[in-house]
Image (tube, rainbow, N blue to C red):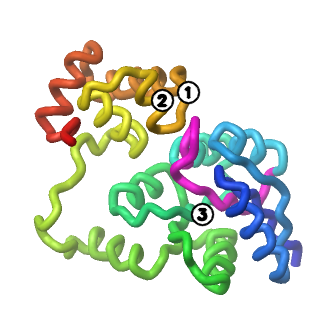
């Protein structure tokens, strides 16, 4: 069988090197590209046409969720497997909505990463054990009841909610960009998307809506 072609996307070079070494130590893999942010990831996927993209979520510039949406739109035959530190329901379901086929937590064992990549390459969906239990509970309607309120503004991405939270806290674009390791242009683009999704006319109305939902607090 042909080897599974993989693109590695993570803003930390050490993580990418570790993943490359891991995959190259296993039979049946070829790492065909790497990227350190979402924009570079989309470009690398279009150039190399891999079978699987191993994708981080939080990265400077375009994050992994936005990159996943772009990849699934442009190259729907490419499977995206999230590999992230974010063990949050909001991030898991945002990744699913973006088109990811799997969700693993960093720290997964070599055998688990190997199994997950092969699964998504074969068209299956796969999640880390703890994440899978929460996904099953959610779709079975048995998720632990209102112990934790749902995130406000579910129509926003994780990154957009982070930006809105900082706007509601009174930060200007330059400070938000510095805090989230983004360019000011990217922050402005996020704000335009936020205003459109919330149907508000601008920053002032967005702040009011955000504070009403509890964002912007220390």
Q: Are marks 1 and 2 in contact (CB under 8 Å)?
A: yes
Residue 81, numbered circle: 3
| Quadrant containing the N terminus in the rendered view | bottom right
**Residue at (75% x, 47% y) in the render:** 45
Q: Nearer the viewer, mark 2 or mark 3?
A: 2
Q: Is residue 144 left or right of residue 136?
A: left
98 or 26, which lies in front?
A: 26
Which of the marked residues, 2 or 3, is nearer the chain's N terminus?
Answer: 3
Quadrant location of the C terminus? top left
Taking depth in this image into account, of 101 and 32 the one nearest to the observer is 32
Camera-side mark, 3 or 1: 1
Quarter residue 200 falls in: top left
Q: Is residue 185 above or below residue 44?
A: above
Q: Residue at x 68, y 63 (%)?
A: 15
The local crowd at label 3, few if under 14, some if 14 to 19, many if 20 or more residues have their Cα within 10 Å, is many
Location of mark 2 (residue) = 177
> Are circles 3 and 1 on residues that touch, CB within 8 Å?
no
Res. 183 mark: 1
In terms of sequence position, does the residue under pointer 1 or pointer 2 come before the other? 2
- The local secondary structure at tag 1 comes to loop
Which numbered disc flags the more N-terminal residue, 3 or 1? 3
Q: Tell which of 55 and 45 is nearer to you.
A: 55
* x, y percent for residue 79: 65, 60
Q: Which residues are magenta?
A: 49-64
Task: Estimate how packed mark 2 is, as few (under 14), some (14 to 19) or many (20 or more) residues with alpha carbons within 10 Å.
Answer: many
What is the spatial separation of the Cα atoms under label 2 and label 3, in whole angstroms?
27 Å
Residue in the picture at 21% in, 72% down: 143
Report helix, strand or loop for mark 2.
helix
Cα–Cα span, label 3 and label 1: 26 Å
- Residue 35 location (% of width, % of height): 73, 48
């Amino acid at each position: 069988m042909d080897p599974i072609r993989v693109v590695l996307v993570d803003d930390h070079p050490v993580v990418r090197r570790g993943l490359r070494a891991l995959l190259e130590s296993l039979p049946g893999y070829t790492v065909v590209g790497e990227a350190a942010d979402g924009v570079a990831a989309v470009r690398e996927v279009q150039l190399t046409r891999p079978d699987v993209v191993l994708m981080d979520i939080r990265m400077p510039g375009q994050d992994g969720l936005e990159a996943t949406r772009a990849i699934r739109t442009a190259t729907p035959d490419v499977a995206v497997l999230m590999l992230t530190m974010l063990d949050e329901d909001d991030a898991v379901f945002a990744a699913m909505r973006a088109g990811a086929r799997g969700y693993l937590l960093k720290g997964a064992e070599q055998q688990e990463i190997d199994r997950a990549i092969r699964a998504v390459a074969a068209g299956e969906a796969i999640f880390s054990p703890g994440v899978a239990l929460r996904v099953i509970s959610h779709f079975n309607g048995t998720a632990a009841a209102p112990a934790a309120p749902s995130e406000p503004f579910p129509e926003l991405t994780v990154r957009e909610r982070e930006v809105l939270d900082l706007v509601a806290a009174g930060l200007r674009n330059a400070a938000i960009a510095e805090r989230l390791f983004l360019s000011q242009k990217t922050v402005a683009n996020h704000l335009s998307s936020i205003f459109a999704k919330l149907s508000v006319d601008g920053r002032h109305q967005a702040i009011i809506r955000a504070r009403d939902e509890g964002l912007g607090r220390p």
